[in-house]
Image (cartoon, rainbow, N blue to C red):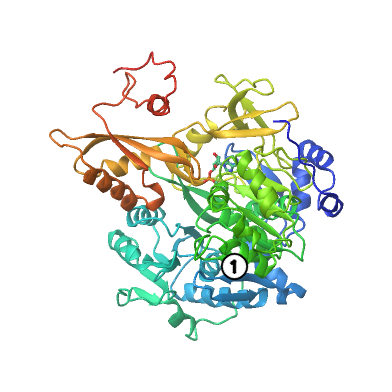
Amino acid sequence: MNELYHPPRHIVRNANVKDYEALYQRSMEDPEGFWADEAKKLKWTRKWNKVLDDSNKPFYKWFAGGKMNIIQNAIDRHLETWRRNKLAIIWEGEPGDVRTMSYHALNREVSKFANVLKAMGVKKGEIVTIYMPQIPELVIAMLAVAKIGAAHSVVYGGFSTEALAARIDDAKSRVLLTADGGFRRGKITDLKSIANDAIQRSPTLEVCICVKRTGHDVYMENDRDFWYHDLMNLPIASPNCATEVTDAEDLLFILYTSGTTGKPKGLMHTHGGYAVYTSTTHKYVFDIKDEDRWWCAADPGWVTGHSYLVYGPLINGTTLMMYEGAPNHPYPNRWWSMVEKYGITVMYTSPTAIRGLMRFGDQWPKRHDLSSLRLLGSVGEPINPEAWRWYHSVIGGGNCPIMDTWWQTETGGHMITPLPITPLKPGSATKPFFGVAVGVVDENGAEVAAGEEGKLVIKTPTPGMARGIWGDPDRYVETYWKDYADKGWYKAGDSARIDEDGYVWVIGRIDDVIKVSGYRLGTAEVESALVTHPKVAEAAAIAIPHEVKGNAIHVYVILRQGITPDKALEEELRETVGREIGPIAKPDKVIFAESLPKTRSGKIMRRVLKARAMGQDVGDISTLEE
Ligand code: WT7
């Protein structure tokens, strides 16, 4: 791992941060001063009393006493400058239709929809669920909800009825914002039908607003379902709407993510700290300038989309690109043709997407002039050096540094990441961001020597960190903070090592979380999906390394007495998981077993299954019961 890539001189010369060490040291010596300086660059209705309030650890508060609505910064303040007429969004649909919106136009749409939501009785503090394809209305909906002081819960458009219903239920949403469907690989995804089934199950849902995207026939229930375009044409949809004043610590959104056990948890993020953290990281890590055309290819349904497709870029007044469909539709050059067409300067995607497109060969990107690119980004899982080199040389032409950013739904923004000036080692997320101290510890919580593998911990509170788990504060403490309570450290759930040069190498999850194509799933979720099938008695899910997806899910299934396994049942079980969670969770392999390796206390030893499946030594099995 001695490969070192130095950033090109023109990048260093123009970088927003020129001296990482000095600023990092400042951020460690005086974190509150550092974050106050960044916060001052934003617009506040009232300044904070205290930068960091740690009187109730680990429930940290940032900029307490301050009043700021993130929309004041993502939209309102740009209207007072030349950026009013700057493009905010360039959107391309999968069929090739294009829409663009200036900050002025975005404000009109958001304000109109904010007024619609108010007319529908949406109140400050309530959680509005959003289930949409990647269309501009998804962003407009998020911003409109935030503008009136309510909170959003965006559910990824690839999730199934069950997953959507569970999230609506947990958030007790009264209003659902959806669309008839979206385009993906030339087909229509039927979101409204899925939404209809989910609403049927919900005791709280009263109103559903539906965007017409595909125009196919959908069922609309009288007095419950409303077309977005109808409402936006009513007099109530006035383009003037004052942004609600919110406290810095008021809830901005919850976002569900998978954990080790039980149902997905809704991580909470608030207006002030999240605004400061996403804009600061976006500006420094991606070296954002006013001339940039930024493309974060993630779906807004994930945290990457929240922080770096929507909020960070808009707060920085950036022109962002958004694309509805599949990267290889109709051909594997789709992404590269858009980079050329729109003159994208900074692009941010996942190792899975890079590997997937790499597979089609160099001829596809080579057909396009990608010289507008200045910087590249990667997120979601470790990037293997081979994919890194391809991204660097074929896409970046050998002179675009790659920002391999490590972070989580929980952290709200980048935690370990290079800056454009950082010498890079392919596969390493390099160094902690400003204000972030990290460590790698052993079973007893003691720090390991350089180069040794251990558990990744975060030692400092940061403004973008989640404020808790919706409706379950104990679980928040239990999951992340209990193990190192004496030291006040946060358990990331990943294993990592830090080399002699202080570079962090994140290896992967050490809990029962699986990253499939960068998507985060819990083994528990997959297993409970399987046991909903009447023929299944018990199930265990494991992750097996996969060339494109990073990991693939393999499941071991014990059938009920008297049931004989066959190919059809195997397919049925894969479909069951798809129906319960979503297509991304479908296992690659279903293995029928007679028994599962368990500890005496009855815990499935997935590690043993995995070692066996990979032909490795099963290790210490002294706790194995059978
Ligand atoms: C988990 C968090 C961060 C937004 C998308 C994922 C893995 C994320 C990297 C990276 C190695 C990474 C970790 C982490 N991960 N980025 N650059 N290198 N691993 O957010 O769905 O909450 O998943 O993704 O395992 O814990 P998330």
**Most extreme residue toward the left, as rendered?**
562
**Most extreme residue toward the front, as rendered?**
363
The answer to whether residue 337 shows anywhere in this view is yes
The percent position of residue 171, horizontal first and vertical second, equals: 41, 55
State the quadrant of the N terminus.
top right
The image quarter in which residue 308 lies: bottom right
- Give the residue drawn at x 60%, y 48%: 412
Looking at the picture, which amino acid does disc 1 mark? Glu
Of residues 144 and 197, which is closer to you in this image? 197
**Most extreme residue toward the top, as rendered?**
622
Instruction: Please give left or right for residue 176 compared with residue 1 in the image.
Output: left
The percent position of residue 219, horizontal first and vertical second, equals: 30, 73
What kind of element bears circle 1? loop
Instruction: Please give left or right for residue 45 compared with residue 155 in the image.
Output: right
The percent position of residue 70, horizontal first and vertical second, equals: 63, 61
State the quadrant of the C terminus.
top left
Tell me: residue 353, above or below residue 560: below
Tell me: residue 493, above or below residue 202: above
Of residues 402 and 358, which is closer to you in this image? 358
Tell me: residue 446, above or below residue 511: above
Could you classify mark 1 by the number of other residues whose Cα lies within 10 Å: few (under 14), some (14-19), or many (20 or more)?
A: some
The answer to whether residue 64 shows anywhere in this view is no
Question: Which residue position is annotated with label 1?
Answer: 244
The image quarter in which residue 222 lies: bottom left
Instruction: Please give left or right for residue 384 compared with residue 580 in the image.
Output: right
